Image (cartoon, rainbow, N blue to C red):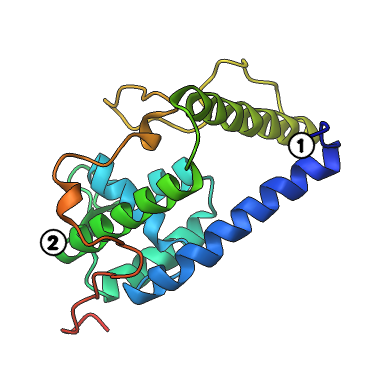
Amino acid sequence: MEDPDLFEFRALLYRTSHAQRQLMHPFMASIGLGTGQPRLLSYLEENGPSSPRGLAEYYELDPAGVSRMLDALSKKGLVAIAPAADDRRSKVVSLTAEGKRVSQSWSAACREEAAAMLEGFTPEERAAFADYLVRAHANLRAYGRQLAGEEPRPATERLDPMPAGEEPRPATERLAPMPAGEESRPASALSQPSAPEEASHA
């Protein structure tokens, strides 16, 4: 295969991302989530309570849009939003028990989707692929700052704000095998979603 030209690189990334969306969106809807909401639950499950601004900064999203998504998740009973203990004007968002259950169901489906995407890749190829994506993202961020006339940041600077007290994680960590005990799940988490409870969360 010849090296693709620069436009073809972008087309390849788009087609891969589009295939991911087509695969995951039906499952996302089946567990009662809308676009953008799963990532917020995943962050809260992994890192614990956060401020809405912290979530917006981590995912590089519009704070107002994040607030609307959190309000929707709160109405579904998946997150709890409360005043911060040290500043009543600020808010802290945390997962409810139902939110944790839904988030874990989503995480299992994401692992299944990633395993399918990386089928046939050697461990070395997986590590290289993750590294290429990290570097591509860094280049795009740097180019965006250049276009905006901002001061350049060191090439080694972390792309996303790191939550307080969290240690850096290897780029390939999210590509790791399923946790022990995951084999006891149904053959396909995607084809057998964990349906949301019908209580007063609608």
Single out the mark in the foreground, 1 or 2. 2
Give how far across and how far down residue 172 sits, in percent: 42, 28
Give percent across and percent down for residue 18: 62, 59
Mark 1 crowd level (few <14, some 14–19, many ≥20, 10 Å Cα): few
In the rendered structure, find residue 148 and report the number of the disc placed on it. Answer: 1
56 or 118: nearer the viewer: 118
Q: Tell me the SS state at disc 2.
A: helix
Q: Is residue 94 left or right of residue 141?
A: left
Of 163 and 38, nearer the camera is: 38
Q: Is residue 51 visible?
A: no
Q: Residue at x 50, y 47 (%)?
A: 117
Disc 1 residue type? Answer: Ala
Q: Residues within 10 Å of mark 2 (few under 14, many from 20)?
A: few
Residue 31 visible in this rendered orientation of the protein: yes
Residues marked 1 and 2 touching at CB (< 8 Å) = no
Residue 116 picture location, percent across and down: 45, 49
Q: Nearer the viewer, residue 84 or 41?
A: 41
Where 177 sits versus 55, above or below? above
Quadrant assignment, res 72 = bottom left
Is 34 on the left or on the right of 106, as rendered?
A: right
Which residue corresponds to mark 2?
97
Q: Please, is residue 173 above or below residue 95 in the view?
A: above
Instruction: Kindly identify the amino acid type of the residue bearing the numbered disc 2.
Output: Ala
